[in-house]
């Protein structure tokens, strides 16, 4: 993830729709095979920023254990949501905490360039919510709302 984010920080912050445009499916599969076999991937050789913006995880970063709490965050009063979110992410295993923290910090940089790249926190939440947490079909709205709030309040949640 670090290599991908470094590349996108250097090459993708001003690309319109950087996470919304599709990359070549064959190249995506090649990159995934390289990652899965432990090979290095150099996106600079591939000439497609959108390729670096694609990927899959076998399990959600925010873990299945937090699913119900995240989906039900909307029932928490708005003045307590940041505290609850902070408690939730801090309860994650260390690697599951470090990865979303790194990713969300990067996505805040993407959003800071939204006038050019059109990737606001709401747009990023639609793209990344389903990648941070999934499980039961119809909860995409609450997951995206959690992700947008996480992006809006990242400086407090990960403080």
Image: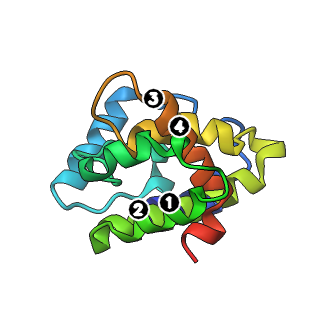
Mark with earlier residue (4, 2): 2
Locate residue 125: give its quadrant.
Answer: top right
**In this image, 145 relative to 33: left or right?**
right
Q: Nearer the viewer, mark 3 or mark 2?
A: 2
Q: Are marks 3 and 4 in contact (CB under 8 Å)?
A: yes
User: What residue does disc 2 label?
Assistant: 88
Of helix, strand and loop, which one carries label 1? helix
Q: Residues within 10 Å of mark 2 (few under 14, many from 20)?
A: some
Residue 104 seen in the current view = yes
Q: Real-space Cα distance between discs 3 and 4?
A: 6 Å
Q: Real-space Cα distance between discs 1 and 3?
A: 17 Å
Mark with earlier residue (3, 2): 2
The image shows residue 58, relative to residue 150, as above or below, that is above
Quarter occupied by the N terminus: bottom left
User: What residue does disc 4 label?
Assistant: 144
Q: Real-space Cα distance between discs 4 and 2?
A: 16 Å
**In this image, 114 relative to 83: left or right?**
right
Q: Residues within 10 Å of mark 4 (few under 14, many from 20)?
A: many
Q: Position of residue 22 (x, y in %)?
A: 50, 28
Q: Real-space Cα distance between discs 3 and 2?
A: 18 Å
Q: Residues within 10 Å of mark 3 (few under 14, many from 20)?
A: some
Picture residue at 72% right of the left edge, 37% below the top: 16
Q: Position of residue 35 (x, y in %)?
A: 25, 54
User: What residue does disc 3 label?
Assistant: 140
Picture residue at 56% right of the left edge, 67% below the top: 157
User: What residue does disc 1 label?
Assistant: 85
Q: Are marks 1 and 3 in contact (CB under 8 Å)?
A: no
Mark with earlier residue (1, 3): 1
Q: Position of residue 84 (x, y in %)?
A: 50, 61
Of helix, strand and loop, which one carries label 2? helix
């Amino acid at each position: 993830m670090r290599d991908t984010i470094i590349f996108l920080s250097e090459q993708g912050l001003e690309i319109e729709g950087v996470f919304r445009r599709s990359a070549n499916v064959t190249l995506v599969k090649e990159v995934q095979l390289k990652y899965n076999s432990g090979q290095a991937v150099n996106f600079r050789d591939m000439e497609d920023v959108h390729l670096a913006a694609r990927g899959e995880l076998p399990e959600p970063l925010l873990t299945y254990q937090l699913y119900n709490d995240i989906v039900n965050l909307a029932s928490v009063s708005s003045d307590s949501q940041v505290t609850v979110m902070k408690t939730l992410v801090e309860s994650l295993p260390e690697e599951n905490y470090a990865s979303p923290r790194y990713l969300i910090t990067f996505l805040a940089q993407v959003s800071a360039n939204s006038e050019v790249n059109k990737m606001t926190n709401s747009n990023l939440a639609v793209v990344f919510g389903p990648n941070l947490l999934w499980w039961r079909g119809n909860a995409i709205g609450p997951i995206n709302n959690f992700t947008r709030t996480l992006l809006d309040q990242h400086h407090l949640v990960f403080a």
